[in-house]
């Protein structure tokens, strides 16, 4: 708004500068010396025309300022401080007191829980009565008459230390033995591999130890 007023004032001043010399020149008598001064030629133009041109320039400047201010968006004056509206306070509600359950109710709940647990527990399985231990068979000893020094591999004939299970050369098992099967007391080879050399004298099939095998054991392993 201030720029528009300034532009209007400048335009009015420019118009006065342009029109005043012309009006003044027209009102002067023909023999007035002032009229002669205004009519004086400067660079081919009368002095009065220079006043008119200067006033026109000032008027144009004022109009430019006025139009620029008129096209500018209006300024919005914001208040320096905004009013702060106080929010209404929430009304305090009295807290609800938590009432503890009576002792009788707690006791009843515990009883119900115990009943449920008892129903869910599986019944203990009755362990079967242990079977009577089988009568232990009397130990039948095999008498070593002549002890061998090595075990001979039945596959490649290589000599192996006593108690060996695989051949040190061909890596094949020296024998196969079943669970609880009677063995040679010298090399642990099965007694069923023994060879008879007399009535009750046998030689081990791997270590060639001479063994005296009782008849009960011979019948059990199939040597009779």
Image (cartoon, rainbow, N blue to C red):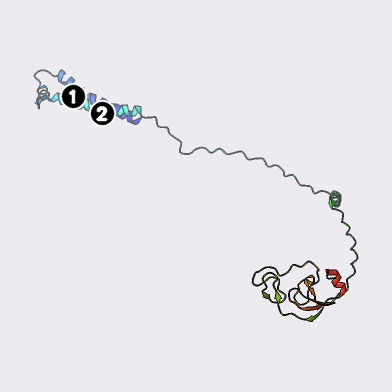
Cα gap from disc 2 to disc 1, whole angstroms: 14 Å
* Quadrant housing the C terminus: bottom right
Neighbor class of circle 1 (other Cα within 10 Å; few <14, some 14-19, many 20+) is many
Q: Is residue 80 above or below residue 36?
A: below
Residue linked to disc 1: 52
> Could you tell me which residue is drawn at 18 percent across and 24 percent down?
52
- Residue 205, picture quadrant: bottom right
Q: Which sits earlier in the primary sequence, circle 2 or circle 1?
A: 1
Q: Which mark is residue 61?
A: 2
Q: Is residue 101 visible?
A: yes
Q: How many numbered circles does the render carry? A: 2
- The one of 86 and 131 positioned closer to us in this rendering: 131
Q: Is residue 112 above or below residue 180?
A: above
- The one of 101 and 83 positioned closer to us in this rendering: 101
Q: Is residue 12 above or below residue 183?
A: above
Q: Which mark is residue 188?
A: none
Secondary structure state at the residue bearing disc 2:
helix
Pinpoint residue 167: horizontal percent, then vertical percent. Answer: 67, 71
Pinpoint residue 160: horizontal percent, then vertical percent. Answer: 68, 75
Secondary structure state at the residue bearing disc 1:
helix
Pinpoint residue 152: horizontal percent, then vertical percent. Answer: 70, 74
* Quadrant housing the N terminus: top left
Pinpoint residue 218: horizontal percent, then vertical percent. Answer: 85, 72
Q: Is residue 62 left or right of 166 when viewed as pictured?
A: left
């Amino acid at each position: 708004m201030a720029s528009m007023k300034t532009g209007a004032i400048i335009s009015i001043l420019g118009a006065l500068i342009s029109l005043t010399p012309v009006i003044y020149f027209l009102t002067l008598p023909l023999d007035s010396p002032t009229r002669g001064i205004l009519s004086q030629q400067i660079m081919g133009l009368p002095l009065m025309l220079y006043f008119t041109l200067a006033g026109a320039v000032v008027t144009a400047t004022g109009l430019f300022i006025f139009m620029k201010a008129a096209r500018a968006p209006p300024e919005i004056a914001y208040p320096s401080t905004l009013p702060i509206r106080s929010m209404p306070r929430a009304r305090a509600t009295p807290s609800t007191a938590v009432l503890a359950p009576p002792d009788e109710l707690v006791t009843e709940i515990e009883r119900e829980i115990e009943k449920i647990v008892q129903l869910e527990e599986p019944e203990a399985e009755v362990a079967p009565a242990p079977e009577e231990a089988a009568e232990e068979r009397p130990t039948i000893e095999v008498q070593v008459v002549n002890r061998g020094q090595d075990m001979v591999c039945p596959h490649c004939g290589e000599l192996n230390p006593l108690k060996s299970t695989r051949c040190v050369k061909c890596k094949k098992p020296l024998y196969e033995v079943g669970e609880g099967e009677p063995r040679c007391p010298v090399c642990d080879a099965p007694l069923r591999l023994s060879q008879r050399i007399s009535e009750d004298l046998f030689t081990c099939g791997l270590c060639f130890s001479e063994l005296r095998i009782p008849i009960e054991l011979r019948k059990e392993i199939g040597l009779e």
